[in-house]
Amino acid sequence: MSQLAILGGNPVRKQPFSPWPQYLPSDLDRIRQTVESRHWGGFPYPTPLATEFCLSFADLQGARYALPVVNGTVSLTVALQACGVGFGDEVIVPAFTWDGTATAVLAMGAVPVFADVDPDTYCLDVESARRAVPPRTRAIIPVHLAMRFTDMDALMALAREKNLKVIEDCAHAHGGAYKGQGAGSIGDIGSFSLQESKLMTSGEGGLLTTSSLEYYEALQTVINCGRASLSDEFGRRMIGLNYRMTDLQIALLIGQLEMLPALREKRAKHAQLLTSLLSGLPAVRTLPPQPAITQPTHYTYVFQYRPEPGQPAPHRDLFVAAIAAEGIPCDGRFYEAVYRSDLFYATPGNCAQLKSDYSVCSCPVSERAAYDESVWLFQFCLIGEEEDIRDVARAVEKVSSNLDELAKQDPSLAGVKAMGRAQRARFERQKNY
């Protein structure tokens, strides 16, 4: 095996992968037409252009309604407000996710309660969530992460038992389905991100789905400055702000929706090939299949770094850096355990609803995933040609076959920033708890 690129050898791959985002020539025409129309904003809400797009998106996901919003974090706060979550209420969230899933809860004056994730899917572990349900729990936010779904059968049973609202965080799940039901159509409300890295993007933005007319009306009111919805059958009056998406973004999203099915199929095909090529490599564990997924969708391809016990092996971060040096874009600390993240500034001093900080939180599977185990390959690696996938596999094989040599190197080669001061202090308090 040739010398690792991180140690001065030649990389497996030098050419870039397919660019992201993708766009169609018709997108440019549509944007020009929107500019020339001189109607660029999002009022009246939803606009005729947005209404047409949202009908198509809702149909794809198996929901009755969809609405656009400024981003995928605001979409969660709007959903929480529509579900009646208020100050001091508790909301169960997975510990291994983007910080925004939890900070959206804080923004509503509610309290995020962290549950651990399943070691085979990295999605919310329903039994961990059950154990975490405190007296004031009003809602639960499962996150369909990377390329897997939360066990929605078990989760919905728990929600019915405990009378909880379910808001699906589908930031990674555009076009995906669980047992024939589209992401965002199983719970009360679905929340999708349209940030630039996502499977559909308008640069920034979000979408909400629901099959409840009551929630659909409430969502419109919150997004549209408190105005009543056009149908107004339920007559709910709520505080709202201007969270409307512009028609310039909608014009771009129409093409994104047109491209999604073909790109989804290509990602699924290439992910299946990659799994077959990675299976059996030293220190590599591919995620087990999840038969309940009837329409796979891949925001990223994730596998696990699992060296044999007692085997000389570098830390996960150095393993990932070595793969990246071979010309394969990837990440290890893609997400942190949220309660350890330096972006999660949640204390009783700045969040009046909190009675204590999160220094004693412990979700072992989430921590192992965040700091020791998970390896994330970006979705644009999957949308090119089959040879791209074989390059990915060759790079992983090259690194995994040189673990002994890599283990002798300075860990600083990984180039991963050490924990911040606040994060380190929380970690030390937790270790001593």
Image (cartoon, rainbow, N blue to C red):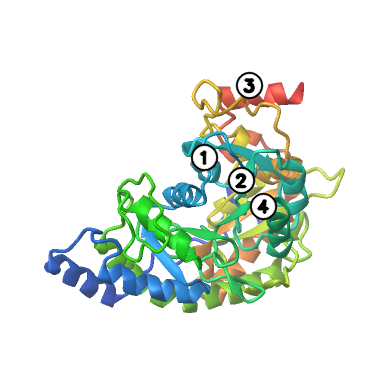
Q: CA distance from mark 1 to mark 3?
A: 31 Å
- Helix, strand or loop at label 1? It is loop
Nearer to us: label 1 or label 3: 1
Q: CA distance from mark 2 to mark 1?
A: 9 Å
Residue 307: x, y in percent? 79, 49
Q: Is residue 384 visible?
A: no
Q: Which residue is mark 1?
A: 86
Q: Are marks 4 and 1 in contact (CB under 8 Å)?
A: no
Residue 416: x, y in percent? 57, 37
The numbered mark, 3 or 2, whose residue comes first in the sequence reads 2
Residue located 44% across and 69% down the image:
65
Whether residue 151 sits left or right of residue 354 in the image: it is: right
Q: Amino acid at mark 2?
A: Arg
Q: Amino acid at mark 1?
A: Gly
- Helix, strand or loop at label 3? It is helix
- Helix, strand or loop at label 4? It is loop
Whether residue 312 sits left or right of residue 19 in the image: it is: right
Nearer to us: label 3 or label 2: 2
Q: Which residue is mark 2?
A: 138
Q: Amino acid at mark 3?
A: Ala
Q: Amino acid at mark 4?
A: Asn
Viewer-side residue, 414 vs 173: 173
Viewer-side residue, 311 vs 213: 213
Residue 425: x, y in percent? 63, 21
Q: Which residue is mark 3?
A: 425
Reply above or below: 62 against 306: below
- Is the residue marked by circle 1 packed among few (<14), some (14-19), or many (20+) residues within 10 Å? some
Q: Is residue 57 visible?
A: yes
| Residue 182, picture quadrant | bottom right
Q: Are marks 4 and 3 in contact (CB under 8 Å)?
A: no
The numbered mark, 2 or 1, whose residue comes first in the sequence reads 1
